[in-house]
Amino acid sequence: MDNKISSTRLYGLDTLRALAIILVLIYHYRVVVSNELLFGFITRIGWVGVDLFFVLSGYLIGDQILRAYAKKENFSLKHFYARRLLRTLPNYYVVLALYLLLPALLSPTYTAPLWQFLTFTQNLDMRPMETFTHSWSLCVEEQFYLLFPLMCMLALARGANPVRMWVIIIAGFIAAILIRAYMLNAHGGTQITGKDYYEFIYYPSYSRFDELLPGIAIALLKNYHPSRYEKLLRYGNAFFVAGLAGCGWVFYVFLNLAYTQETGTSTWTPVIGYSLLAISFALLVMAALSPCCWLYRQKISGAASLALWSYAIYLIHKPLYQLLEDPVKNLGINTDGYLGMGIIVLISIISGWLLFRLVETPFMNLRTRWFPSNNKTAQVPAGALKE
């Protein structure tokens, strides 16, 4: 395997993934380095890049597993877990080691026990300003990788129809909304503190898992209702416009109505806002999968590479922001301006590429050699990286 971009990659999904990592880079620059709104409202709303990653993961992983069940392939739970671990753990351990080796520079307040980082459970009681806080989203995804295949085994065993999966998806949405409502009410309601908001609503998996569900729903539609799915794909541009409109409205709500000095935290914005955000992003994913939509057809220069490196960039960028701020200032460069930001972000992207090239790629080569597919017997040729 090499790190060339596959000719079979879906450009629309690459564009969305590249957009997601760009949004995160912009948002965390404000959080870690400069409070300046260098990109206006995008600087404040950039945290939604993680939510877009969730929807994309729900679709990509859901498609792998549901396709195997729909086509009655010989799906191997062992192969799936092995492929996921070889994909996600090496980069993660390198960055975790960086945090553990440089506690004075990268661990400002509190570090969770090592066993939580090793089991991806640190997000269940995480608070702002702790060590490696952006790992919360990795916890959500790793727990998803663990539980979703088991859920499919129970719901789709012996050629069962997909009704049970649709019930699970709908019930999951309702459950997540009810959980967020309960957590908000239990920890201060409209007067909830920022610390409690992050600890009980923003970071934990039980409050955010529903954002994976719209992607799973697309994969379920594609693999169990193919004729209906193909008909829907004819309306790719309509999905694109609807997705943009939905995102615009949800962004406005989070930016302007989620919290005010007069009324405190809005009751309904955090309760249903994350679900509506994920649904809006799912509409864009549908557009990206539709051959009639320009998002599907348009290959944006650099987007495929950013998409390919996005996991490594996501892991490494925040500690590098912390480490690079003072050296850049010592060079007489203002980190509150575009030049300082450009230097720090560019170094973070290059470092992400190095992490991808030196750590991720060798393990992906091993994955292709040892576990070439999620099926027990099927073989796929070594080639471009797959999700």
Image (tube, rainbow, N blue to C red):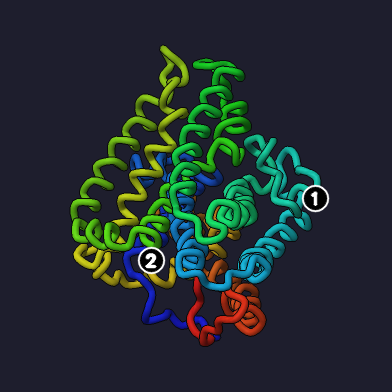
Tell which of 262 and 304 is nearer to you: 304
What quarter of the picture does the N terminus occupy? Answer: bottom right
- Where residue 194 appears, x then y in whole percent? 57, 27
State whether residue 10 is above or below residue 59: below
Indicate which disc residue 185 carries.
none
Q: Quadrant of residue 222?
A: bottom left
- Where residue 279 appears, x then y in whole percent? 36, 43
Report crowding for label 2: few under 14, some 14 to 19, many 20 or more residues within 10 A (C-alpha): many
User: Distance from label 2 to label 1 (Cα)?
Assistant: 34 Å
Q: Residue at x 45, y 20 (%)?
A: 267
Q: Residue at x 24, y 53 (%)?
A: 240
**Amino acid under disc 2:** Asp
**Amino acid under disc 1:** Leu
- Under circle 1, the secondary element is helix
Indicate which disc residue 114 carries.
1
Q: Quadrant of residue 237?
A: bottom left
Q: Residue at x 57, y 76 (%)?
A: 373
Tell which of 291 and 241 is nearer to you: 291
- Where residue 22 appears, x then y in whole percent? 42, 56
Q: Quadrant of residue 257?
A: top left
Q: Which residue is mark 2?
A: 14
Q: Residue at x 63, y 69 (%)?
A: 76
